[in-house]
Image (cartoon, helix red, strand yellow):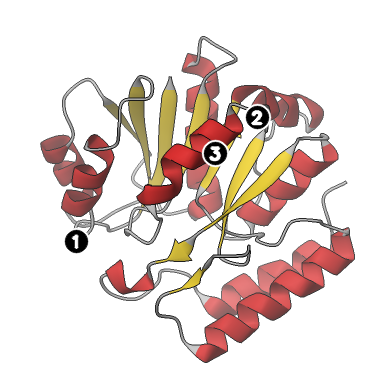
């Protein structure tokens, strides 16, 4: 089984295109879509039920807005409770169309070679951005360099949502960290779970990806200042 874990927050403009892409994805295995709703106030939930076939999806959430980290953790917990095979995989991705579905087949196949975590990387050779401001590129690059040096990380991309996790790695993280897969509520949660996977000796590989920012409708939901403060706090109190 391949579980698609997708956090959503006011994504009604993206759901139709997302459904077309995902339902057209080749049937390499059974697919199930887990949408973790982070308090959407638009038609996101209604459109998910309209565009995805009945019986192929679950919508989680209590109607409150906590942040993407909380949404991811809620989804991971649900999947771990319902997964019945160590061969299952979890694909995490954005709902806004910026993830390149075209490389997903390769990511899944590489994961089956024994990798516990496959990262879609804009910094790997062949990856990049199709439309992003120079300032955002510089900030992203500088933050990546700082955290790679601080944590002695060998991977290039630290915060991308687009990943493939093996079920054993997720269970190992949960067991090692007192039943908590992700504790950070915000966007830094992707760095948190990556560091935890590395601490658990997960085998990790990166696949080059072009980030399709031009497919996003409206502005990114990431609050730059709030995210910046959370990164500083994470440096002061890192994952052990």
Look at 57% across and 60% down and name the residue there.
187
Query: Residue 93: in sight, yes or no?
Result: yes
- Estimate the x, y position of residue 189 in percent, counting from the top left: 63, 53
Mark 1 neighbour class, 10 Å CA radius: few under 14, some 14 to 19, many 20 or more: some
| Camera-nearest residue between 64 and 115 | 115
Helix, strand or loop at label 2? It is helix
**Mark 2 lies on residue:** 170
Query: Left of 173 or right of it: where is 70?
Result: left
Task: Tell me which numbered mark, 3 or 1, is placed earlier along the sequence.
Answer: 1
Dot 2 crowding, Cα within 10 Å, few <14, some 14–19, many 20+: many
Mark 3 near mark 1, Cβ–Cβ under 8 Å? no
Measured as percent of width and height from the top left, residue 166 is found at 61, 28
Quadrant of the rendered structure where residue 231 is?
A: bottom right
Q: Secondary structure at mark 3?
A: strand
Left or right, residue 227 beside residue 97? right
Residue 13 marker: 1
Residue 216 appears anywhere in the view:
no
Q: Residue at x 29, y 37 (%)?
A: 25
| Residue lying furthest bottom | 134
């Amino acid at each position: 089984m391949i579980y698609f874990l997708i956090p959503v927050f006011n994504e009604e403009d993206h759901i139709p295109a997302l459904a077309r892409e995902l339902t057209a994805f080749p049937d390499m295995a059974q697919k199930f879509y887990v949408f973790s709703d982070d308090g959407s106030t638009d038609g996101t939930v209604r459109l998910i039920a309209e565009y995805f076939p009945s019986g192929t999806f679950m919508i989680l959430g209590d109607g409150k807005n906590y942040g993407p980290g909380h949404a991811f953790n809620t989804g991971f917990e649900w999947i771990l409770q319902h997964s019945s095979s160590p061969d299952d995989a979890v694909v995490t991705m954005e709902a806004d169309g910026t993830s390149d579905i075209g490389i997903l087949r390769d990511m899944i196949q590489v994961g089956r070679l024994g990798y516990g975590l496959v990262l879609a990387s804009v910094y790997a050779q062949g990856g990049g951005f199709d439309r992003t401001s120079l300032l955002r590129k510089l900030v992203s690059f500088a933050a990546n360099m700082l955290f790679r040096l601080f944590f002695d990380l060998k991977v290039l991309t630290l915060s991308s949502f687009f990943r493939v996790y093996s079920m054993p790695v997720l269970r190992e993280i949960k067991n090692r960290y007192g039943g908590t897969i992700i504790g950070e509520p915000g966007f830094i949660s992707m760095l948190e779970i990556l560091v935890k996977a590395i601490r658990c000796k997960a085998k990790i590989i990166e696949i080059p990806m072009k980030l399709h920012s031009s497919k996003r409708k409206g502005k990114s939901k990431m609050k730059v200042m709030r995210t910046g403060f959370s990164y500083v706090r994470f440096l002061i109190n890192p994952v052990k």
